[in-house]
Image: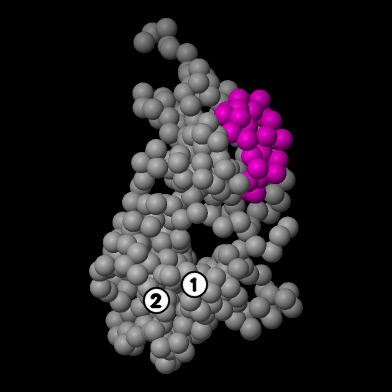
Amino acid sequence: MSDAAPATALAPWIAAQRTSLLAQRGHAWLLQGPSGLGQYALGLELVRAWLCDAPTAHGACGQCGSCHAISVRTHADLCVLMPEVQMMALGWPLSEKAQADIDDKKRKPSREIRVEAMRDAVEFAQRTSARGRGKAVLVYPAEQMNHITANALLKTLEEPPGDVRFVLASEAAHQLLPTIRSRCLGHAMVWPGEADMLQWLGMQGVGDDAARAFLRAAGGRPDDALAWAQSGRSPQAWSALPQAMAKGDVTALGDWAPPQVIDALQKLCHDLLAASVGAAPRYFAPADLPKALPPLAALTRWSRALSKAARTAEHPFNAGLMLEALVAQARNTLHSRQPAASPHS
């Protein structure tokens, strides 16, 4: 695997939002909306522009020392707060102590934003900026703060040092403390039109038919559609998923992590529930779904079981057994039949 992932062209709807937000004043932004709409990309564009040596109305110059420092993840005036698993995936360095603990197998990388990292960020906010253009704190996904971590941030948001700005990017802003939300200027992420999304996916090398299929699988969310396209999975495999589950075919999901399996089955369950009440499916083409729909009661039970499974998906007792159980559950639900009408009814 190469050290650097290929650069993704900035989506035009992210660039337009960046220009709009840079024209407004405020020390803290909350970027909010469903996953896959580019909260992280927009947040990073804002801090790039705030810290840039030669910014324009449309963002950072991309050429100066500040822009280079952000690109190589070494900017002294930028503090990034994320769960450690995401920091590592996106190439942001952990603190020396956190990295040492993980390297020494004392603990696993965290899946939430740790209070120790937030305390470091609060201390960072109090320091003088190194480059003289102020400081910035990027928090993503902000809903991954627990209450202790969020309260540590709240005090700094309420009384921010003069030259620090914050951008909180969230895919579940309703989970944030109301006091956190009230201290920020809110921005609802733009949901782009299909033509714009198809054009952008085409710029990333995704063919039109595949882009349409991946957008459907992602529920119309462009970042998630691109992740689907880059995962190496075929659009045909997604279309064939309902039929594979009806057969109990575990191999159709064999290389998927448990959270991805549950997400896919929840999408299938959603579309079957929608179809059973006469609504249009969202994630699959109507022709992909079985003609004989399971009873509403069976689908409702399945939906509840998937929600319960999702709570332990990150730490399954045995991933292989969990996958087999989930596929068996899907097969049984898909083969459920409407109860026969009583002869006396």
Of the image marks 1 and 2, the number of the one nearer the N terminus: 2
Give the side of residue 20 with respect to residue 164, left or right. Answer: left
Residue visible at 35% across and 70% down?
Answer: 56
Instruction: Give above or below for 198 relative to 5.
Output: above
The magenta segment is 231-258
Image coordinates of residue 203 in percent, x first then y, are 51, 45
Residue that badge 2 annotates:
54
Residue that badge 1 annotates:
63
Give the side of residue 176 with respect to residue 210, left or right. Answer: left
Image coordinates of residue 254 in percent, x first then y, are 70, 40
Q: Quadrant of residue 252?
A: top right
- Give whichever of 231, 159 is nearer the camera: 231
Image coordinates of residue 73 in percent, x first then y, are 56, 74
Instruction: Give above or below for 105 relative to 221.
Output: below
CB within 8 Å, label 1 to label 2? yes
Does 235 appear in magenta? Answer: yes
Residue visible at 36% across and 27% down?
Answer: 279
Image coordinates of residue 261 in percent, x first then y, are 60, 43
